Amino acid sequence: MRRYFGRKLLIYGLTFFVAVTINWMIPRFMPGDPVQSMLSRANVAQPAAVEAMRAHYTAMFGFDLPLWQQYLNFWGSLLKGDLGISIWLFPTPVSDVIIRAVPYTLGLLIPSILLSWFAGNRFGAFAARRKWLDNTVLPVGYVLTATPYMWLAILLAWALGIVAGVFPVAGAYGFDLRPSLSWEFLGSLAQHWFLPFASLFLVAFGGWAIGMRNMIIYELEADYVDYLRALGAPARLVRRYAFRNAILPQVTGLALQLGVLVAGALVTEIVFSYPGLGHLILQAIQNQDFFLLQGTFLFIVIGVLIANFVIDIAYVLVDPRTRTGMGGAA
């Protein structure tokens, strides 16, 4: 297992290096001048003052240096935990801006990922044994899993927000409220949270339900199931073994789909103007904020890599065959 996790750490380390390098390159090859964008918001009329400010901020952000030196300085600052200063929200540090947005994104991602995976697998396993569910309700799963996150978010906002008027369609809480532990604020927070959560949950739920339904049917036709039935094992015990074997590919699928779910959360936040990392990315692009854009991407890359590594560990713990294979390889 030490060799296994050592290889995994090496792979994740190389992935992190390549992803962070691409993350650094993307903003710098985008069209536009971030310093000019910053000065345009300052409304300075005197040309001499504008040129002096341009030279000052260009040197401050290091844009006057060669690209190779900017790249080395980026890694040096990153190793110190310094993500730079936001151009859009100057002089606020990028880390402070991201810290304020992270709870909103995690509040959407963690419940939607865990609940959709658990509920989808349970429902798929149940539908595989019930013909009426398999023929009526489960086909809805095919529609859900083929639905883009953004399109479903827009549909829910229109149906439940604009037409029905049940849920708000913008922000994380009422615009007339301030964050507090009052029941009024928490209720408003839950109302604004529901539609973005439902958008992520429904799409993911459909995919997990279909995958588990297909895996259960496959497992119930396996030789070990026929052997258990021949020994007189009760149907409940047979289904339990089938579910345990069917859940393993779903754990792998969770690791593979994690990036898709994160991307879905980002575009869903944009639809609902939800103040998470997706909203920050949009604002950083519109305001040509290099440092905020690369800092947000960096946090997402680190989060996805850590989550995948945790899933790798969970897979080894869940499936004893992987540990046996490691021992044999050693």
Image: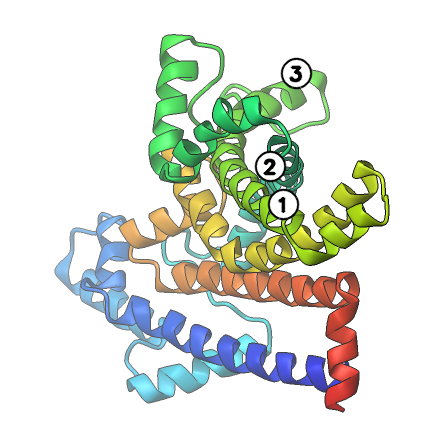
The image quadrant of residue 214 is top right
Query: Do residues under tags 1 and 2 come within 8 Å of each other at their CB atoms?
Result: yes
Residue that numbered label 3 is attached to: 184
Name the front one of labels 1 and 2. Answer: 1
Question: CA gap, disc 2 to disc 3?
Answer: 38 Å
For marks 1 and 2 on the same chain, the one whose residue lies earlier in the sequence: 2
Amino acid type at image mark 3: Glu
Amino acid type at image mark 1: Ile
Task: Out of 62 and 323, give the one closest to the viewer.
Answer: 323
Q: Secondary structure at mark 3?
A: helix
In the rendered view, would you say 119 is above or below 266? above
For marks 2 and 3 on the same chain, the one whose residue lies earlier in the sequence: 2
For the C terminus, give its image quadrant: bottom right
- One can see residue 93 in this view: no
In the rendered view, would you say 101 is above or below 224? above
Residue that numbered label 1 is attached to: 216
Q: Residue furthest left?
A: 47
| Colour logic | rainbow
Left or right of 75: which side holds 223?
A: right
x then y, percent, for residue 35: 26, 63
Name the front one of labels 2 and 3. Answer: 2
Q: Residue at horizontal 65%, vertical 38%?
A: 125
Name the front one of labels 3 and 1. Answer: 1
Q: Secondary structure at mark 2?
A: helix
Question: CA gap, disc 3 to disc 1?
Answer: 45 Å
Q: Secondary structure at mark 1?
A: helix
